[in-house]
Amino acid sequence: MDTYWQKRSQKEIKSTVFNSLEKNVNYNTQNILGIPASYLDEKVFNQDASFVNDAPFISSLIQNPNHIGCHTLGKSESFFQGTQEIEKELIEICAVDILNGEPGKQDGYVASGGTEANIQAIWIYRNYFINQHSAKRDAICIMCSEDSHYSMDKAANLLAIDIYKISVENDARELKEETIKDVILKAKNDGKKYFIVVCNMMTTMFGSVDNIEAYTNQLADLSCEFKLHVDGAYGGFYYPFTNENSLLTFKNKNITSFTLDAHKMAQAPYGTGVFLIRKGYIQNVNTQQARYVEGEDLTLIGSRSGANAIAVWMILVKNGPFGWQEKVFILQKRTEWMCKQLSQLNIEFYRHEMSNIITIKSKYINKEVASKFGLVPDNHTSPQWFKIVIMDHVTIEKLILLIEEIKNSILNKS
Ligand SMILES: *Cc1c(COP(=O)(O)O)cnc(C)c1O
């Protein structure tokens, strides 16, 4: 049963958002003199326009609440406590109703995106090993697959820790336990004792999902200290709905945290990465020097727009859990349709059966077709693959045009 996530009418959504905005400070009616914040420039963004009174998201943008800090624990800026409540409910929906966590047992916030949420996770674990295990920085490393997002490389660089990549099979995009074992042994040989493991819940290029047990079996066999983060920046609002028996949820004791991006599959505005972590860990990145912020700051970003959290909350409660299931169901059906067409043409491609990404071997796609249909290559210098992402706007009518074009280019070749 869904604990927090319920479908709500437009009327309910409006009243919830407007009531929460009213509980924030009002720069017009109150004398708020001490914060470097205000509503958006009135000369450009008119608060009194008649349509604004009917538009909760636009109103949130114009009133411009700052959700600086993390609101699921301790104190937060009281100026914006009204809309922070909406963010707290959003975090509960994601952690409990989507990822099977227990109510009230996770912390989280709306980050700028998947990149920040992944760096936040790795930052927390690096400090956790230093604080709790007196680890030396050079004994800590990141471990992830070669298909992982490049934000892991950014994290390694920023946090000054080494990163080890596990190669995957070319066609199946799967991790092998043997390969993981070899990499762990090499890392140990290099003096690594603490592993920050990032498991993919749908990769950016292939939509592939890592076998978490391949990691945890090997880490246990070789008695490694580890913390495991799941990168669901792409798949977070998709895979939990296509795989009922997913091992990538908070029910899995080996997992401590997740990244989910609402600005990908959830069609939210950019700036809506969701970071979630079991309680008791985020304190490892408390910046106590953030003295002017009420409650200090446990996030990487600093100031961030409250309107972003409101947008994601609105999208989820407008659809409701069953509406979401239906949305994903339709995308799955279209993906299956497309795979069938490709198979009939004997075109080789990769698709994880619970995903809406189809990655085609580059020999079947010429440059003209790729650029005409905006197909994205795995790399721009010597592409081996091109991907199709079946989003809301990627309808069968549009896919038919691509199929026709591919057919013609094959005919022309032979
Ligand atoms: C897109 C993506 C990211 C990075 O997210 P941004 O929101 O672009 O910062 C990280 N991981 C995966 C798997 C992604 O698909």
Image (cartoon, helix red, strand yellow):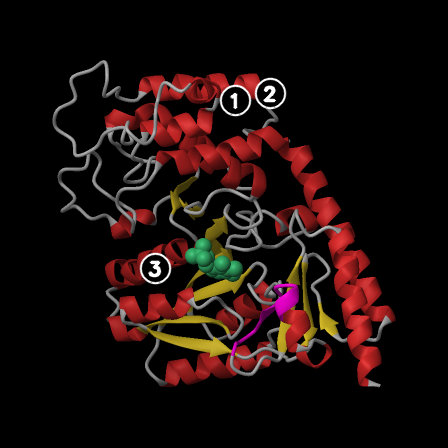
Mark 3 secondary-structure assignment: helix
Q: Which mark is residue 73?
A: none
Q: Nearer the viewer, residue 339 or 353?
A: 339
The outermost residue toward the front is: 43
The outermost residue toward the top is: 29
Residue 248 rendering spot, x and y as whole percentages: 57, 54
Circle 2 sits on which residue? 9
Q: Nearer the viewer, mark 1 or mark 3?
A: 1
Circle 3 sits on which residue? 125
Q: CA distance from mark 2 to mark 3?
A: 40 Å
**Number of numbered discs visible in the structure rendering:** 3
Q: Could you tell me which quadrant the C terminus lies in?
A: bottom right
Mark 2 secondary-structure assignment: loop
Q: CA distance from mark 2 to mark 1?
A: 6 Å
Instruction: Examine the residues drawn in magenta and state their main secondary structure.
Output: loop
Circle 1 sits on which residue? 13
Three-letter amino acid code at disc 2?
A: Ser
Picture layout, residue 341 above or below residue 316: below
Q: Picture quarter containing residue 315?
A: top right
Picture layout, residue 174 above or below residue 80: below
Three-letter amino acid code at disc 3?
A: Tyr
Q: Which residue does the image show at 60% across and 20% down from the upper left?
A: 9
